[in-house]
Image (tube, rainbow, N blue to C red):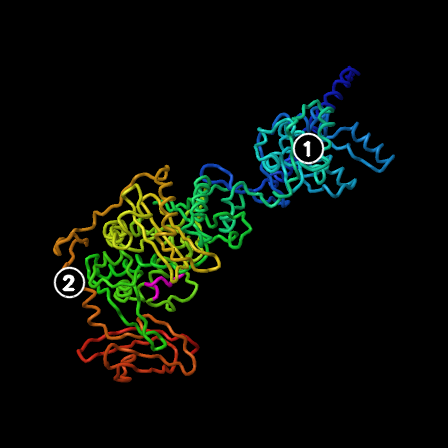
Amino acid sequence: MAFFTSPSSEIRRRIRISIYAIFIVIGAVFFLTYPLADSLKVAADYLDSSIIKDRNGNIIAILPNSKKYFSLPVSDPPSAFIRLAIQKEDRFFYRHPGINPFSILRGAISYIASGNTRGSSTITQQLVKILFGNEQSRTLRNKLIEAVYAIALELHSSKREIITLYANAAYFGNRVQGIGEASRFYFNKSSQSLTDTETLALVLALGSPSDRYPGSYKNNSMLPRMAVVFGTAIDTSYSLMAPDGRLSARQTDSTSFEINSLHIPCPDSCTLSIDSRMTQSIREILRNNLNLPSLSNAEHGAVVVIGLPENELLSVVGSPNPESPAPGYQINMALRARPTGSTAKPFIYLKAFERGARPYSLVEDREYAYRIGTGFAFYPKNYDGTYRGTVSLHEALSNSLNVPSVKVLEFAGLGSLYDFFENSLGLKPIQPLENYELGIALGALETDLLTLSHFFTIFPNGGIFKPLRIKLDREEFIQTPMGANILEKRRVAEEDVIQLINKILSDRETSVDQFGMKSNLTLSSGSYALKTGTSRDYHDSWTIGYTPDFLVGVWVGNSDNTPMREISGQMGAGKIWHDVAELFLNSRYNKRNAFSFDLIREFDESGTIEYGLAGDDYSKNRLLLEEADRGSVIDMPHDADVFLFEKNTALQLISRSRAEWRINGEYVGDSESFTWKPSAPGNYTINAIDANGNVETIHVRLQGEE
């Protein structure tokens, strides 16, 4: 018997094969177009601007995207914008697969007739064109490629996803990309808060944003007519001028002025430790105080606030009004190096305490003559020009006395202080520290407010020096202008000597001689410490103060370095410091922690309570500086001095009385003043022995080519 296939069976087989083939083709198209659609979504991500937010989620700044435009993407475009955009640009958006054959045919006829193809692209095709950057290159080849990609995007995206991508990619003129940034830039509100009239003004910019952006003449003139066409009511109170004055104001608040000057890398959106609302309040405090008659000749100021113990940078204000065209207002003075005045003294006393001195140690506050490199003498003076005789180190630091601080620095040793600043804290001075010598105790050292504030955090943090944190969403820290790149915390001082410094700086009673019982430095909270500073001839006014929860640093002066009229640290920076500190005392940043003084011991051997450490030899330590001064022989040079070695270099060796001089162990002379001419650069040990047998040894370095 012969077997054969019936016609109906053959037809069914062919149908099955055709169906399989169709599914295979559809599947192949689907999978082959996925990379195309995915590449478009990746390209859309590159249109998003990096957004810098503060710790509370408030936007500080919006940075240019890959097209140098500003974009603030939204996840949910307003329905009114979607409706009007579709009505204007693509009425069949919900019906076509990415391309509209009828629109293409109409465009082709228009091109044949007039050479114009406008109106033939769907919203999906427009989106692809933007993502490809083909706005200015409308070749046939580009249009065909865009059509393929448009179909691919439709296959792998919902209509809602596509219209959202379009809303965020559409260009609205003035370097504004996307409905989110357009709403903020033109109307200073979120896209969801737009009125119907504002929404229509944005929609009219589509297709011709360079001359129809909101506020332009064409946009304003088209609004009434297009409102009738689209069935939208016009708000009669609507009036928007061209935003020419806002073209450079892309940041959301003035905090961006300081953030930009800090050059914080933020390739992706990031969240900073900054509190922008508190920063705005601080700027207002700074501006209001600088407008007071008492500060009439102080034009500029800066404030830094650091959250403790984490060392989070909460605020940087470097100008009272960064939008002012007045000279100096466009400079972030929180980053400019200035003479620090007496704010360097706590570090000097810290090094002295490490060497055995104590707050109860005595020092003579009297006239001293110090010889300088010229051979002449200079006489350091106190702020008020008077001497107090024998005082304790507690009194000297509390009242910021200059003369005793010079003696304390002599005792601590210049080399020890240099090493602490440069190696422990990472200071990068604008000139070698050796150039300042004892002038550091008199306020000559220069640094900027941000760096100095960071250094001061070792006191409330118990001797631990921590990186200055700037980002909350990642472990990234800021390098201050004159500081090293600190990435890990490290101990730079023992907690017991730190507690001695905190005890003195928080003692308002002992400082009454200099600052009075009640002043700008008096806060409503009892647990705070501070140090003021005034540079020579009143060029700079400083106050750095802290609680265990936050630190506030303030500088006041003039950016052109002109002096102020007798504005001290207390009168100038102190008033601003008080107002900012009170602001934070009444904020969530005040956790009401108190200083710890558990390592301090009280002594009552002199009739008054004095502070030291357990195990102290009170009698010995009390006279420690006097004994050290009595055994001092050499006036010039100082230990750790560095000199430039050149041909015919000569150094003046000066002793307090006639002395025998030895250099690297070799006898070189016997006199009160001796001129030494080194033969080569290098390190030298200088010994001087006076008639009483006192021996002093110092080390100097001559720099130069061998």
Q: Is residue 24 magenta?
A: no
Q: Pinpoint residue 627: horizontal percent, then vertical percent.
A: 18, 68
Few, some or many residues within 10 Å of mark 2 (<14, 14–19, 20+): few
Instruction: Residue lying at the far front in this picture: please name it.
Output: 293
Q: Is label 1 or label 2 in front?
A: 2
Residue 654, horizontal then vertical, whole percent: 29, 78
| Placement of the C terminus among the 4 image quadrants | bottom left
- Rate crowding at label 1 as few (under 14), some (14 to 19) or many (20 or more) other CA atoms within 10 Å: many
Q: Nearer the viewer, residue 409 or 477?
A: 409
In the image, 624: left or right of 379?
left
The answer to which quarter of the image holds residue 213 is top right
Q: Which mark is residue 511?
A: none
- Name the residue carrying label 2: 620
427 or 368, which is in the foreground?
Answer: 368
Q: Earlier in the sequence, mark 1 or mark 2?
A: 1
- The picture quadrant where one finds residue 646 is bottom left
Q: Which residue is mark 1?
A: 152
Q: Secondary structure at mark 2?
A: helix
| Point 78% across, 28% down: residue | 101
At a point 84% along the width and 35% down the height, the residue shown is: 111
Q: Give the magenta-colored segment's residue range.
A: 439-446
176 or 407, which is in the foreground? 407
Amino acid type, label 1: Ala
Q: Quadrant of the N terminus?
A: top right
Q: Is 111 left or right of 469, judged from the image as shown?
A: right
Q: Is residue 310 above or below residue 663?
A: above
Disc 1 and disc 2 in contact, CB within 8 angstroms: no
